[in-house]
Image (cartoon, rainbow, N blue to C red):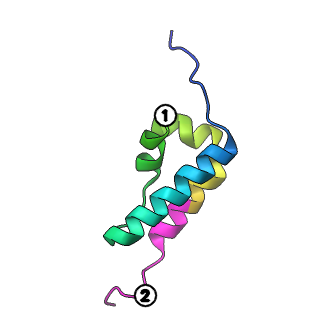
Amino acid sequence: MSRRADLPSRSTVQRALDELLDETSAEGVRPTVVSLARRLGLANTTFWRHFPAIANQIRENARTPSPASPT
């Protein structure tokens, strides 16, 4: 049996997301749900289960072409 993960608060997740967005923007790469989940010490599936709105926000952001990308 697996143990229940200690979940971060919504504000902690938002702060981690803001940091991730700043870092990935500076590096010119797109953020991923997996990278945010790892940053918070959570499995990807656990993150999706408890923070689906944020996960979908990241996924939709990844699907949107960046303005600087060639068409």
Local crowd at mark 2 within 10 Å, few (<14), some, or many (≥20)?
few
Of 44 and 9, the residue lying toward us: 9
- Give the spatial CA distance, label 1 vs label 2: 31 Å
Identity of the residue drawn at 58% across and 57% down:
56
Location of mark 2 (residue): 67
Say which of 38 and 64 sits in front: 38
Q: Quadrant of the C terminus?
A: bottom left
Q: Is mark 1 on a helix, strand or loop?
A: loop
Residue 8 falls within the magenta-colored stretch: no
Residue in the image at 37% along x and 87% along y:
68
In the image, is residue 70 part of the stretch drawn in magenta? yes
Question: Does residue 51 appear to the left or right of 24 in the view shown?
Answer: right
The crowding category of the residue bearing disc 1, from other C-alpha atoms within 10 Å (few below 14, some 14 to 19, many at least 20), is: some
**Residue placed most toward the observer, 36 or 16:** 16
Q: Dot 1 corresponds to which residue? A: 42
Q: Residue furthest top?
A: 1
At x 48%, y 42%, the residue is 37
Q: What stretch is highlighted in magenta?
A: 58-71
For the point 46% across and 65% down, the residue is: 22
The amino acid type of the residue labelled 1 equals Leu
Where is residue 55 drawn, in percent x and y? 56, 52
Residue found at the very far bottom of the displayed protein: 71
